[in-house]
Amino acid sequence: MSAPVVSATMGAMNPLIGKLAALMGDEYKKLTSVRKQASFLKDELSAMKALLEKLELMDELDPLAKNWRDHVREMSYDMENCIDDFMRDLGGADAKAGFIKKTVKRLKMLRKHHRIADRMEELKALALQANERRMRYKIDDSINSTTHVIAVDPRLSAIYKEVAGLVGIDGPKKELKSWLQDTQEKLKVVAIVGFGGLGKTTLAKQVYDEIGEQFNCKAFVSVSQRPDMTNLLRSLQLDLKVEESSRTNEVQDIIARLREHLTHKRYLIVVDDLWNQSAWNIMSCIFPEVGNGSRVIVTTRVEDVAIWACHNDHECVYRMEPLKEQDSRMLFCNRVFGSGYACPSHLKEVLVEVLKKCGGLPLAIITIASLLASHQTRSTDKWESIRNSLGAKIATNPTLEEMRSILNLSYMHLPLHLRPCLLYLGMYPEDEMVRRHDLVLQWIAEGLVNCSHGSDLEDTGKSYFNELINRSLIQPAETSKSGEVEYCRVHDIMLDLIVSKCADQNFINVAYNCEGVARMHACEYKVRRLSLKSSTNDATLRIVDTSMSQVRSFAQFGESKYTPPLSLFKYLRVLVFIFPFTRSTIVDLTAIGQLFQLRYLKVSTFPGSIDLPAEVRGLVHLETLEISSGARSIPSDIICLPRLSRLILPIQPCPPQGISNIKSLRALHCMNISLEDINGLTELTSLRELRIYTDVVAGEVDALVSLIGKLHGLKYLKVSALSSQHHCGPMYSLSNPPLHIEELDLPGWILKRVPTWIGDLHFLRILNLWVDNLSNDEVHVVGKLPCLVHLDLRVYAEGGAVICTGLFQVLKVLRLFSHDVAHMQFQIGLMPSLRQLTLEVNNGWGGGVPRGMEHLLALDHISVFARHGVKHRDVESAFRSVVDVHPRRPFLEIINNGSV
């Protein structure tokens, strides 16, 4: 049975109808009047739902129809909250019939059933009023009979395009590199200016990646339209590995430390998405004029800002131009038909007109191409329909509104279940790296994921995410070790569209300051989801009061010493605090025990502190609890939460005893759990992800090996030995490994050799092993794994193994740490997909390099750790000789670690 889903247009109509159906069930048969009213409401609301679904497919609505839609949407939220209150009074949503009988008897004594019946009468009156308005305004007549659902191809995995595959960038890249690689020794600032969607950031990132090796210090920082300069500079400080001062964290102090650090470096810094001169005036203070050829690249939409950043030197301003017709066509066809395939003859005429309307803007071309690629059929009618929907002005006048009209077209062609998922990204700040897993779990907690036919909710949510990537509505930002998109970003023009739609449909309210929150108080509708962005302050938070009591999701980004009155948010499902680089922040969560509906809680603050309540057993719906750091204590009764499926705890303090009692757990991350709990984890049959960090006490090795052998449903396992390196003989004799595991990570545990049972892990994608010895036979065991894409291998015995031919067919990343790289050999046919290779050289290294690296035909990145007195220039010279003769000329990175 499909789960009821919350919609941006219909609000909570779907889950509301589901809950009314539950009130009509046998367990509530003693409440005769309530069941009767619930039946009436269900029928009325079902009729309204059918009309709302038709209205959701319309881009432009008659004002009366829009008013009616908005009224019914808000009514559905209020009704669902009311039903939730009933069910809580009646003993909880999961109450059993026997318990209900006792509860009903108690309610009769307390006369609570009268209050419930009266409230149901009020809800009935609201529904009747809504239907009367529908008839009076003739809402049904306003529907365009030609509106229909566009058929789409709901794929589970996205087609990811390499940035390097974008066409039309070679010329600009070559010219910009020539500007930056001249002989000028003084600091040079180059600005890239152009309209949003032209590819400024893509161009800057490509140049940054290609010339970055020429600098000994580099960073890429996004400023955005409303920057929090303190957090932005702290982030840059972290990227550049500048030590923090214990004195102060004022902007002036951070600037001074950054400037001092860069004074001794030849640096390359990209300042992306700069909007105004004032932000540049602050940023420019960190760049010392050191006369060693340092470079800064600025990207901006504003020409005056570009000229200002370049000190009025117009020769240093690169103006981005739209793609030429041939490049536009190639980019479009590569996305729709695949690289190397041409447009079918019956679509060529429409293609020319579509490209003309896209005006050579890469963002517009990719977005429309992704929309067309989502259709299973390539009929002329479909293409002409989309062509006719495009505005005509963008080809000659690419304004923000014209660009938004193209993105809006892609939004309107989204399947209805994906629309609220896309809009939910409005909770996050501009340029934020949004983690896929967080987003999916928040969608689930808010009821945005529709699961049917026994499929897994998280897998379904992941397919939603991939479909949004596939349609180019969100952009992949970072991939995991297994090659999946793990983080995404939203282009600022798309985010602007999302926020405007959220406001129009009262889906999310966003505030940046006190005035923004004050406007919410004056709004016609109640606030359902609230996001406070990084520039908010304590004064803003203090006016978040009872008028916000209907909030279902609350997210706060940025430093604060004040936490909003959480006890007022009794309908809250999702609660997120993201406070990076903040010392003074104290997140007061002592009131969350009263949030009966809470399903998702994530707090990330470093190095602030978090106050949790002593008891949380009332959070009977809580599914995700993720605390990054700073918690002063962990409530001991989290082990009593009946639905907790994801528990992520910080390094300190120690987790409570009895974690193994949480039978619903699917994911557990924690440190130093007791031996008793390690043994108890074998009973957690739902566990799919286990990441534990341990100091290793007596008996733990055998217990851990036994645990691995019994958790047959595991997909991700990391057991990290913290205190020292431990030999793990029992691991070699494991007789019953989890055959469906996809990631096996055992840092700190030294095995005598590669266990033979690893060859049976046919789903394994990521492997991290530390072994004493490595023979050719053992390499063969690992090399035959059909899905292995990432291998970390640390070998302690001296002498390297000859890597066998024809193995590791899908491996993309190899990190191999051994004493003597000179004995390694890569033979023809080995690792045909390998993209990244990491090695190390230690004290006593004789200058040799692995043989046969030229046979790694897909290799594009080599990293070498120079350790224990090995000179950087010697390593650079030795491996540069390999790079120079390699057919792909891979990027070479030398990482100093204890070197001179």
Image (tube, grey):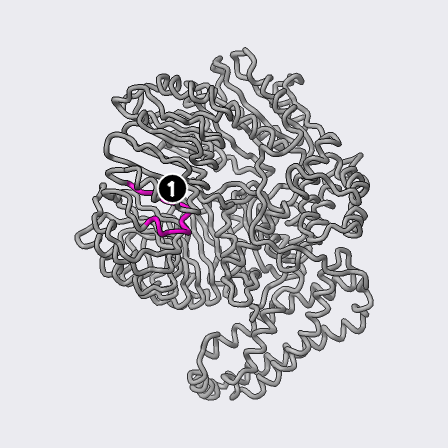
Residue 767 on the magenta segment: yes
Classed neighbour count for the residue bearing mark 1: other residues with Cα under 10 Å, few (<14), some (14–19), many (≥20): many
Q: Nearer the viewer, residue 735 or 561?
A: 735
Rendering coords of residue 306 (x, y %): 64, 25
**Residues drawn in magenta:** 758-770
Residue 439, percent from left and from top: 52, 52
User: Residue 43 sits in which quadrant?
Assistant: bottom right
- Decide if residue 537 is in sight here: no
Is 402 or 113 nearer to us in this picture?
402
Residue 806, image x and y in percent? Answer: 42, 37
Residue visible at 68% across and 53% down in the picture: 376
Residue 113 in view, yes or no: yes
Q: Is residue 899 magenta?
A: no
**Residue found 58% across the figure and 87% down from its top:** 33
Label 1 amino acid?
A: Gly
Residue 720 in the image: above or below residue 314: below
Name the image quarter holding residue 243.
top left
Left or right side of 347 for 201: left
Regarding mark 1 in the picture, which secondary structure is present there? helix
Q: Which residue is mark 1?
A: 783
Q: Nearer the viewer, residue 893 or 248?
A: 893
In the picture, the quarter occupied by the N terminus is bottom right
Q: Residue at x 45, y 66 (%)?
A: 621
Residue 315 to residue 207: above or below: above
Image location of residue 759, percent across then percent down: 35, 48
Query: Is 823 displayed left or right of 538 in the figure?
Result: left
Q: Is residue 700 left or right of residue 780?
A: left
Hey, which quadrant is residue 524 in on the image?
A: bottom right
Q: Which quadrant does the C terminus fall into? A: top left
